[in-house]
Image (cartoon, coloured by chain):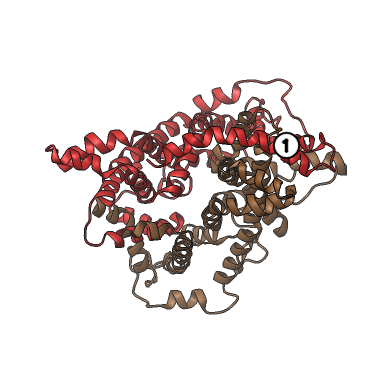
Chain colours: A red, B brown
Amino acid sequence: MTVQPRELVGQPLAIGAEERREGLVAKGWRFVSRAAVPVVIYVFLIAMVIFALFPAYFVVQAAFRPGQSLYTLTLSLWPSDPTLDNFTYIFTKIPFPTWLRNSLGVSVGTMVAGLIGSATGAYALSRFRFAGKQMTLILLLAIQAFPSVLALIPIYLILKTIGLVGSPFGLVLAYMSVALVFCTWNLKGYFDTIPRELDEAALIDGCTVTQAFLRIILPLSLPALAVTALLMFLTAWNEWVMASVLLLDENTYTVPVGLWGLQNDYRVPWGYFAAASLVVSIPVMALFLGLQRYFRTGLTVGGVKG
Amino acid sequence: MIIGVGLISLYPILYNVFISVTNQNLYHFKHYSFIGLTNYHNLLKTVDADFFIVLARTFLFVAICIPLFLGLGMLTALALNHPAVKFKAFWRVALIVPWAVPSYITALVWKFFFNGEFGTFNQLYRLVAGPQAGLPWLTDPNWAFASIVLCNLWMSYPFFMVVILGALQSIPGELYDAAAVDGAGALSKFSRITLPLLRPAILPATVLSAILTFNTLNTAYLLTQGGPFVSAAKPGATELVMVYAFREAFQLFNFGYIAAFAVVIFAMLFAITLGSLRFSGLVREEAR
C-alpha cells in the first residue's frame, strides 16, 4: 500500500528531472561536441537491438525456408522462395498437436493446483501466528535454494514408487514442488501489504476466517494472483529438464521435450523445429512482454515494504 | 496447506539425504544398502576429484558471466535513460525480447548458430576469412566455454537492464542539480550519485542472478551435453555443476553419489542465500 502514492508522486518528478539533467550532461561533456553523445548512444542501441533480435529473426526466417535450404555454407538472410510447408508438416506429420495439448494440460494443472496451494499457504503465513512460523519461513527459503535438478533424483524415485513416472500427473506434482515455494513466498509478500484492519473488520462483522480470505483478501490481491498464476504457467510451459526425465512416451511429451528430440535428430530438417518454436513461443512472449511492466512493481513492492 | 507444501516440497529433499547414504545406482537399483558416508568420502577424497573440478569451473563461469551481464545491463539501462533517446518504449521492448524467449529454444537456436559448417557465426566468419575458414565454436574446450558464456549473456542481460533502469528512474534529479552547482563533472556524478544509489537495487539482483547462473543447466547441456570431453575419466569442458549432476544421475544412474553431491551443493547454496538475505536486510524485515 505504501508503494502506490510513492509511484504516483515519482512520475512528474522524473519528467522534470530528465529535462534538467539534459542541460547538465551537455555541460559535463562540453569538451565533446554536443551531437557526439547521442550519436554514440544511438549506435550502441542499434548494435544492441541487432544482437537482441537477430536470433528471433533467424528463427522466423528459418520457419519459412523450404526443405534443406538452411544447410548452406554461405550466409543467406531471407529464403528466396518462402513457404508454409514447415507449418503444415509439424501439424500433420508429427505428434506436435498432441505435445501442444499435453503442455497446455500440464501447465494449466500446475497453475490451478499451485495457485490453490500457494494462496492458502501464503494467507496462513501472512495472517496467523503459530508455533514454528519463523522456522517455516526459513525452511521455505532453504527449499528454494535447493536446485530443482538436484531434487530430480528423489522426485524421480518417489514418483516411481507411487507409479507416476511417465504420467502427466507426476509431472504436475514435480512442478508443484518447485513452484509452490516461490509462489507462496511471493504471495505472502503481497498479502502483507494489505492492511490487517480490513480482515479484522470483516471478522468483527461476523465473517469466518475462510470468508475473510475468500471475500476480502483474494479480491484485493487479484493482480498479484494473476501474475503468480502466469509465472507458474510459464514455468511449466517452458520447462525441459524435469519433463525430459519424467516423460517416457512420445505421446505424453510436452512441447520442450518433443522439440528437443526433433532438433537433436539430424535427419529432421531444422525448419520444422523453427516453425514449431515460433508456434510455442509467440503466445508466451506476448504474455511476457505484456506483463513486464508488472515485474518492476513486483520488485518495488518487495523493496519498500516495512 | 502448510503441511501440504511441506509434504510436496520438503519430502523430496529429506528423501535425498537418505539416498545419499546408500549405494543406489544402476547395479543396485532395487536392492540398495546403507553404506554410511562412503559417497561423501568419494566425492571429496582428493583435490582433483570431479567435485572440485566441476565446482571450480562453475565458479569461474559465474565470475566471468556476472560482470558481463551487469556491465551490458548497466550500459543499456544508461543508454535507455539518456534524455536524448527518443522512442524509449520501442527500444525497451526490443531489448527485453531475449528474456521472453523460452530458455530451451534459446539454447537450441544458438546451437545452430555455433554449428561448424552451417552455423551463422561461421558463415559470417567465412565472409571475412575466406571460404575454408571456421572457428571451433563448440568443438574446442575453451571456445565451447566462451560460446556458453555468450549465449547466457544474450539471455541474461535484460534482467539487469530492467532492474537498473527502474532504479535509475527513481533517482531524484535534484541530486544532479546540486552536484552541478558544486561543480561536479559527468563522471563524478556517475560515481558519486548514480552508483551508490543503484547499489540497493543491484546487490540483490546480482546475488539472485549469480545463484541462477551457478545453476545453469539448460544452455550448457543443450549446447554441448557437457562436452567436448578431453579424456573419458574427467568431466567435459563445459560440465558445470548442474550438467555434471544431471549426466551422472540420469545417464549413468549414480543416484547415491549424486544425492551426496546434492547435499553438499545445497548446504553451500543455502549458506550463500541466507548470508546474502541477511546482508540485504530482507530476513530482518521478515523477522519482525
Depth order, front residue of A112/A275:
A112
Q: How many marks?
A: 1
Q: Quadrant of residue B163?
A: top right
Q: Which residue is located at x 52 percent, y 58 percent?
A: B242
Does B211 sit above or below residue A43? Answer: below
Does A101 sit above or below residue B256? Answer: above
Relative image position of residue B165 (x, y in whole percent): 59, 42
Relative image position of residue A131 (x, y in whole percent): 22, 61
Q: Which residue is located at x 69 percent, y 39 percent?
A: B79
Depth order, front residue of B58/A165:
B58
For the N terminus of chain A, which image quadrant?
A: top left
Relative image position of residue A199 (x, y in whole percent): 22, 41
Question: Residue farthest to the left?
Answer: A206
Is residue A265 among what the camera can see? no
Chain of the residue that carries numbered disc 1 in the rendered image: A
Task: State the residue position of label 1.
Answer: A23
Does A306 sit above or below residue B85? Answer: below
How many C-alpha atoms fall within 10 Å of the one at disc 1: few (<14), some, or many (≥20)?
few
Is residue B5 among what the camera can see? yes
Q: Quadrant of residue B238?
A: bottom right
Relative image position of residue B11 (x, y in whole percent): 31, 59
Left of B253 or right of it: where is A12?
A: right
| Disc 1 element | helix
Depth order, front residue of B40/B229:
B40
